[in-house]
Image (cartoon, rainbow, N blue to C red):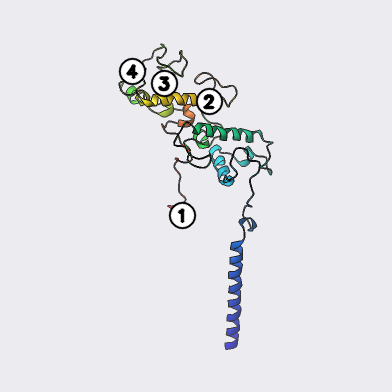
Amino acid sequence: MIDTISSRMSIALRLAGLSLFAAALFAQQPAAGRAGAAPAVAAKNLKVLAPTTDIAFTMRGFNAALGVQCTFCHVQGDFASDANPKKDVARKMISMIGKIDAAFPSSSGAYPAGYHEVDCVTCHRGAAKPVTETAKVYHNLNEFNGHFAPNSKEPGTNLKVLPADTLVHGEESIMHVFRDALKVDCSYCHGFSKPFAADDNPRKEIARKMITMVRDINTNFPGTGTYPLGKQAVTCYTCHRGDPHPESVSNKDYELPAEKK
């Protein structure tokens, strides 16, 4: 009886040892060799992304930003192929982000690495085609108190980047477009109790730079006019969506998984 028990214990110990050895061996195997794991494939045909880019992470970001699947830009089964014209459009968009970043000293690193004030999320917000117009008019404090901006058809003064005949004040004016895009009132850029023509508020110069930047972005899209005239592929609202500080991957709110709460 004792010999039988001893024999069974010896077999059990041997099996346990084999199990531990197998577990250790499995742990040392690369992920690509494990059942159900995605193979680690080296990226090919990178023309604007750095060779060190975490491709899997970056592509998931593009999927989420545009609300599309891989085949929106790639050829099924051949991700290195350039046959899908949207892939070249994507490269232009990545290059465009690099140019936009130059307007923000706070941005750092070559996209997608580092921190960026704007990225794919900023314009797309889960849609393949960015929106250009607000769905709701914003009424600011001055309007609430009855102090409306003058509904004048006279041209604005001290216009440095806008056309001289731009409708500046009143309904459907360019200032109301800015108001709705950033959800701010006139004093945000002009200063409280300051003449509209004054350049005292530094945000006014920033607004001029942003107008120029919107124009530069629109040159990537055939058929667009010189902002704010004509058809536009992107506008102030495209990025701001009612917020003075546009959203990007680095500053948006994320819902933590249940196990991390």
The kind of secondary structure element at disc 2 is helix
The kind of secondary structure element at disc 3 is helix
**Mark 4 or mark 3, which has the lower sequence index?**
3
Label 1: few (<14), some or many (≥20) within 10 Å? few
Q: Is residue 61 depicted above or below 27 in this figure? A: above
Location of residue 84 in the rendering, given as x and y in whole percent from the top left corner: 67, 35
Looking at numbered disc 4 in the image, what kind of residue is underneath it? Pro
**Mark 3 or mark 2, which has the lower sequence index?**
3
The answer for how far apart the CA atoms under marks 4 and 3 are is 14 Å
The answer for how far apart the CA atoms under marks 3 and 2 are is 20 Å
* Residue behind mark 3: 175
The kind of secondary structure element at disc 4 is loop
The answer for how far apart the CA atoms under marks 3 and 1 are is 47 Å
Taking the spot 59% from the left edge, 21% from the top edge, the residue there is: 223
Specify the label residue 259 is tagged with: 1
Image side of residue 51 versus residue 246, left or right: right
* Residue behind mark 2: 216
Specify the label residue 195 is tagged with: 4
